[in-house]
Image (cartoon, grey):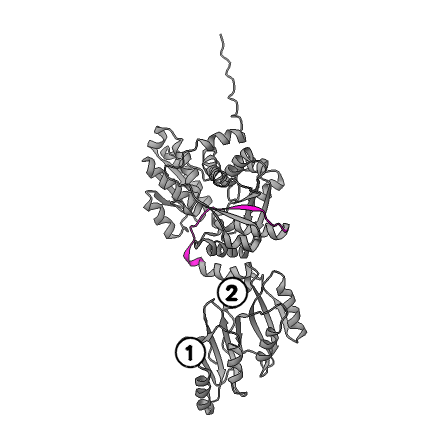
Amino acid sequence: MKTVKVPARAPRPLTPADYLQKILNARVYDVAVETSLDKAKTLSRRLHNTVLLKREDQQPVFSFKLRGAYNKLANLTPEQLKKGVICASAGNHAQGVALGASKLGARAVIVMPTTTPQVKIEAVRALGGEVVLQGDSYSDAYAHAMTLQKKNGLTFVHPFDDPDVIAGQGTVAMEMLRQHQGPLDAVFVAIGGGGLIAGVAAYIKTVRPEVKVIGVQTQDSCAMMQSVKAGKRLMLPDVGLFSDGTAVKQVGEETFRLARKLVDGYITVDTDAVCAAIKDVFVDTRSIVEPAGALAVAAIKQYVAEHKTKGQTYAAILCGANMNFDRLRFVAERAEVGEAREALFAVTMPEERGSFRRFCEVVGQLPGGPHNVTEFNYRISDAKKAHVFVGLTTSAAGESSKIAANFKRNGFTTLDISHDDLAQEHLRHLVGGRSALAKDERLLRFTFPERPGALLKFLSLMQPNWNISLFHYRNQGADYARTLVGLQVPKSDDKAFKQFLATLGYAHVEETLNPAYQLFLQA
C-alpha cells in the first residue's frame, strides 16, 4: 500500500487567551523581580490626572528585557541549553540573555556591533556573556549571529519576535493589574520591535479589555505605527538613535499581528519631549531613565494636553534605565524647551551704547512674566548691528511666538528658534570669533548672583564710554551664574575699571592673558 505524505499544517496563530496562559505560567522570577508601581506625585498634581510609574528600571539589568529573555531560555530543552544560546544586541536584551544563561548554566554568545560603547560590552562580559564584535550596525551583528548559530548549533534568542519572549514581557502587565485594583484608564507602552506592547496588550485586553493600551514611539523611529497604518510590516530606511532602545527599522511578524489587533492607538513624541520626561521621572523618583524608558511619560503629557483630561488614571512603563552618562548634559539643556519652560531667539539690535540695557528693560516688561534670561550669547562683529542668541524662561507652550512679536514691536528684529535643532545643538556654542572692532578688550569671568536686578546693576555701574564686546551667560539652575564678558576699556581707565569691579562686588577672574582667548577670540 502506497503511503501518501500529508503536508504539515502551519501552527495555529496564538490567541490572546493562549498568551494569557503563557503569561500566567511564564518563568521570569528566577532572575527578575516584581517591580513597584509608584504614583508620580509631582507629575500627577501638575497634570491633574493620576500618573502611575511601573518601575522596570529596578530590574537587576535595569530593563524589562530580562523577563522575556529568561522565559525563552527557561523553555528550551536540556539539549539546547547544553549547546548554548546566541543573540544579537547592543543593549538591554544582551544583558538579559547573558544573565539568564548564567543562571541556567548555559553558554551565551552575544554578537554586538563594533560601535557599542565599552561600558555595555563590559556589562555583558561581567554577566558571563561571550562578546563577539562584528559590523557597524545591528543588522551586521544580526547577520553574523545567524551565521554563528548555524555553524555552532546554538539557539537564537530573538529580542522581541518570539511567543516565549512576548509572554515574559507580558508579566509586566500581570503585575500592574494585580498591584492596582482601582480605575485604570490607559497604559502607555514604548515600542521598539514590539515585544513589550504585544505581551502587555495580550494580557490587558483579555483580563480588563476596557483599559486602553497606547503605543509610544519617537517621531524618527515609528515603524509600528507606520506599519499598522499601511496594513503590513514596513522597513524604515533609517531610524533616530537618541532613543536607542526603540531604534528598530522593522517590527516583528508576531508582534505586528498582536499590536494590529489589540493596541488602541499610537502616539509619537519628539526628542525635547523625551528629555523633559526624563526630568519629570527624576523629580518624582530621583532615578534617571534612558530615553526609551521615558517615552511613555512623554506620551501621557502629550495625551493630557491634547484631550484636556482631568481625574483620569494613566500608567507608564519605565522600561529601561541604561543611560549613557555623557548624554545627561544634552538632556538637561533640551528638557527646558521640551517642558515649554525656555524659548530661544535670534535677536538683531543696533550696535550702539545702551541697546543691551534697553533690550533687558523690554524683557522685564514682557506680558505674562517674569521672563528671566536663561542664556545670552553675543560677540561684536558689525559696526552697525549685533546678532545675539537669547534664551528666556516661559510658563506655557506657545509663548515664544508672542514674545518674538513683542520684541519686533519694540524695534528688535527677532527670529524664534525654540525648535531649531541646529541652533540648540550647535549655534549656541559657536557665537563668537575674532573681531577687528574689539579694540582695548578685556575679558573677565564673573559669578553673577541669580537674583532680579543683578545684570542691570552690572550695566548701570559701567561707565558710558565702555562697550560690551562679548557676553556669554547661561543659567545652570544654581544660586550663581557663570558669565563671560568682554569689555572695551581704554588703558587710561584702568583705575576707574578697578573701582567699578570693587563697587560691583561680584566674584571675577580676568582672562585677558588666557592663551585660548588670545588664540580664538582676541583681535
Q: Secondary structure beneath disc 2?
A: loop
Q: Amino acid at mark 1?
A: Ala
Looking at the rendered structure, which numbered label has been put on residue 5?
none
Query: In front: 516, or 483?
Result: 483
Q: Residue at x 47, y 74 (%)?
A: 449
- Across and down, in percent, residue 21 comes to 48, 29
Query: Looking at the image, which residue sits at the far bottom?
Result: 492
What's drawn in magenta, residue-wise? 308-327
Let me know if residue 285 appears in the view.
yes
Which residue has dot 2 on it?
A: 426
Query: In front: 523, or 240?
Result: 240
Q: Nearer the viewer, mark 2 or mark 1?
A: 1
- State how far apart marks 2 and 1 are (Cα): 29 Å
Which residue has dot 1 on it?
A: 507
- Across and down, in percent, residue 497 comes to 46, 87
Let me know if residue 253 appears in the view.
no
Left or right: residue 232 compared with residue 53: right
Q: Secondary structure beneath disc 1?
A: strand
* Total marks placed: 2
For residue 123, above or below residue 23: below
Q: Residue at x 56, y 73 (%)?
A: 388
Residue 310 on the magenta span: yes
Disc 2 vs disc 1: Cβ atoms closer than 8 Å?
no
For residue 317, above or below residue 436: above
Query: In front: 40, or 289?
Result: 40
Q: Residues within 10 Å of mark 1 (few under 14, many from 20)?
A: few
- Across and down, in percent, residue 106 comes to 33, 35
Q: Amino acid at mark 2?
A: His
For residue 121, above or below residue 431: above
Query: Looking at the image, which residue sits at the far top?
Result: 1
- Across and down, in percent, residue 436 comes to 52, 81
Q: Residues within 10 Å of mark 2 (few under 14, many from 20)?
A: few
